[in-house]
Image (cartoon, grey):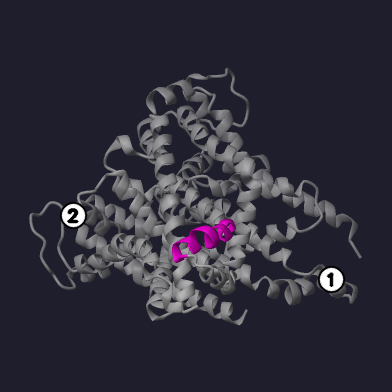
Amino acid sequence: MERRKYPLYFSFPALSVFLLFFIAPTLIGVYYSFTDWNVNADSISFIGFDNYKALFGEPRLGKALSNTLIFAAAVTLLQNAVGLGLALLMNEAIRMRNLFRTIFFMPYVIAPIVIGYVFRAIYHPEHGIVNEALGWIGLGSLGQDWLNDPKWALFSIIATDIWRVAGFAMVVYLAGLQFIPKDLTESASIDGASYWRRFRHIVFPLLAASFTVNVLLSVIGSMKVFEMVMVLTDGGPGYTTEVFYTYIRSTFSMGQMGYSTAINLVLFVLVTVVGVPVLMALKKREVEM
Amino acid sequence: MEHPGRKTLVSAIVFLGALVILVPFYMILVNSFKGIRESALFGMGLPSSWNFDNYKEVFDKGNILRGFKNSFLISGLVVVCVTLFASMAAFVIQRRDDRFMRSTYLLFILGLIVPVSIVPTIRLMGELHIRGTYFSLIMYYTAVLLPFAVFLLVGFMKQIPRELDEAALLEGCGYFRLYWRIILPLLVTVLITVTIVVMVSVWNDFFGPFYLMTDSTKWTIVLQIFNFVSLYNTNWGIVFAFMVIVIAPILLVYLLLQRYIIDGLTAGSVKG
């Protein structure tokens, strides 16, 4: 059958919605980022690189940038480590395996904003579970004001997000583990290979597909974090947990539309620079498979 | 070869992990029945007296049913648009495979990575005179979630043999019938994955309605809770009751369908 006979118009509904409501605003945004668009002013005029000059002279951007990168790196690393660990544990012959699998995935179906509110209670300096639990095991002195202490705030947000998403990574790794033939690991263990060696040389390489999917999704998702930070700290204390979307939100609420579009464009560049190579690696491997 | 203590250790770690997940849920539930003073202590004990007024108050003032209705309407329609549009597009993208289709595919893939430009989106909705309507929010979500769906579906289309198309077309079947009667039914497993992911993303999303929905009668349940907490943040008992009501239906659906949900995501994530 000739390929070109497949009707082009089949792609039009998807393409038009995508072009109109995703690509068009993105391109319009590039223009607005060079304007002084402000809801309190009557007209919009072109001001060249002024927004960017102001933005790069602003320490808040540096904070948003480093926090976003730290958050993305930590979440990617920990989500995969914890998720893989859970998957390996769940792959052992333990009782009620399906029940545990169901429990670990549970937080993922709940809205991040709701989880944020719950953890605000959990991190409460006087009555929160975290400090209470530390008290019970005699480590009360390690208690902190988790969300209001600049040293701990970002860490607490990262921990909350790991609580939420580790189960997702676990499920993807479990899927990968099912494709590994049992006799492969069994024969290696008969040959005297330790658990660690079997994992390093057989299991982990065969998990490559799950690994790439998980890493890609964590990297892309975590750089766009918003609700969790907004609800837990709203970028504070000071700007110590500021990320791109909380910064955009605060300039948006001040009516500085041009400026906030410029921040969005910096995020765009950042996500592209980090995300595209990860995606290319994924695509390349897909070809090899 | 098996270390005797090993199995116990594994079970203990898994059990502890499950506890870390379950304790917060228990904390919300038990405190949702406590009065204003007692709930502020976030204690793990049972309430000194069971207080059901929190729930009554939430139902009276929280506009819960309206929020659920809006969330259900919006996420349902987004699911229909995304699955339909993405499967049609994936069908020709994978089958034609010419330069135009390859660029289209690349554009969608880019949309998978790139963050939404929210401020220009708000303005565009205004220019089109659809700002604040259900339609605008549905189109916004469709545009944002299409890349992911196209990505998964194109990957899956490769596994459907072309011979099937050829046979059908030789029998005199048109392209639309081919798509509708033959291709679409074969995509059902991935479409279930897409439906789950779209449903969960839209239902739980705060970003979209926060920026695009000015009219409070069209707020989704997630926006409803945000607004409610800002008003009642001094009374945790009531806030927790609201959370229980918001979480319960999703959790129920999840627990009933968890097998399909987890298996669907499993299949989608590795094959895509």
Q: Would residue A213 be visible to someone looking at this image? A: yes
Q: Position of residue B106 (x, y in %)?
A: 41, 74
By secondary structure, the bulk of the magenta-drawn segment is best described as: helix
Q: Is residue A93 left or right of residue B194?
A: right
Q: CA distance from mark 1 to mark 2?
A: 63 Å
Numbered disc 1: secondary structure: helix
Residue found at the far left of this picture: A42
Q: Position of residue A223 (x, y in %)?
A: 43, 63
Q: Is residue B11 magenta?
A: no
In the image, what residue occupies the spot 25% across and 55% down?
A: A251
The crowding category of the residue bearing disc 1, from other C-alpha atoms within 10 Å (few below 14, some 14 to 19, many at least 20), is: few
Give the magenta-colored segment's residue range: B174-189
**Quadrant in which residue A282 is drawn:** bottom right
| Circle 2 residue | B127
Q: What kind of residue is marked 2?
A: Glu
In the image, what residue occupies the spot 22% across and 62% down?
A: A259
